[in-house]
Amino acid sequence: MTLLAFDMGGTAVKYALIEQDGKILEKSSFQTPDTLEALLNRLQIIKKTYTHHDLTGIAFSCPGAVDNESGVIGGASAIPYIHHFPFRQRLEETLGLPCTLENDANCAALAETWLGVAKENRDILFLIIGTGVGGAVIKDGKIHAGEHLHGGEFGYMLMNDRLETLSDTGTAVNAASRIAKRKGLDRLTGLEAFALKEADDTVAIEEIEFMYRNLAKGIFNLQYVYDPEVIVIGGGVSERPDFLPAIQAELDSLLAQITIAKIAPKIVSCAFGNDANLIGAVANFNQVHS
């Protein structure tokens, strides 16, 4: 049996034909349409190209606070037209197949829990680092969404008396912004910020070390709040070979200073890169229809 999976992003929609055991058969992408009707039309066209595969259903990874009971996506995102109405119902009416929705960070977590680095674990936290910090809580192998569907929104964690959050202090995007401001530059990308650090630029070194230190503080706090078996770190920046060792060094420094703390968080990188949300969407479909 096969499924279609879609990963809804602000600039592009990735999709794949995936067997229910998680094996990707084909994949592609298209630019995110400007309207709901344009999106639905594109989904219909793609579905028709796979009718010979006898599709079981269609699984979606989406930004926002997904209510699996109502099929409504709360919150806000770069795709405003998918929010605050029965989106799943509209999809099923249009596509004629069972559809499931799940938050994108939760999908990444489900992929790793099902087939990735956390497949042997039951209690896991996921930290997804991008323009902000998102995440997911896995309890007994399943997503813990929380009362308000905001479980895993670790980026809201307050990090200092200036009310800066972990999203403010723990991302390469914001580190680059701080470097640019201090150096009088109009703009700086995360890649350019790391390049400056590697060139021994003092400001870049200070700001990127500040980022690592704050991520380590956040991870330390999460370990003692939830006490997971493992904390899995994802997002584009996590693919840098020096990223996890730098966080680990900051964690070691914290643990050396806080002698009462005897538990060292176990941190690992995600196994799946850009395919994580697609695979996780299928994992969610399997759970919903098990």
Image (tube, rainbow, N blue to C red):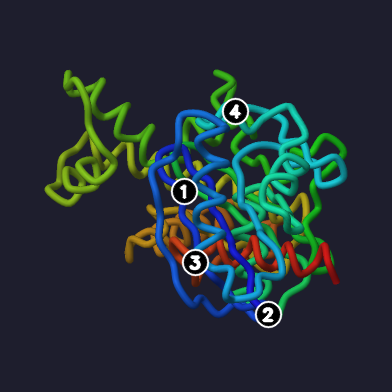
Question: Front-most of 128 and 7?
Answer: 7
**Circle 2: residue type:** Met
Q: Are marks 1 and 4 in contact (CB under 8 Å)?
A: no
- Residue 257: % across, % down: 57, 52
**Circle 3: residue type:** Ser
Point 59% across, 76% down: residue? 53
Q: Earlier in the sequence, mark 3 or mark 2?
A: 2
Image position of 278 with respect to 290: above or below: above
Q: Which residue is the site of mark 1?
A: 13
Image position of 187 with respect to 242: above or below: above
Q: Which residue is the site of mark 3?
A: 269
Q: Earlier in the sequence, mark 4 or mark 3?
A: 4
Q: Earlier in the sequence, mark 1 or mark 4?
A: 1
Q: Are marks 1 and 3 in contact (CB under 8 Å)?
A: no
Q: Which residue is the site of mark 2?
A: 1
Instruction: Assign a secondary structure to mark 1.
Output: strand
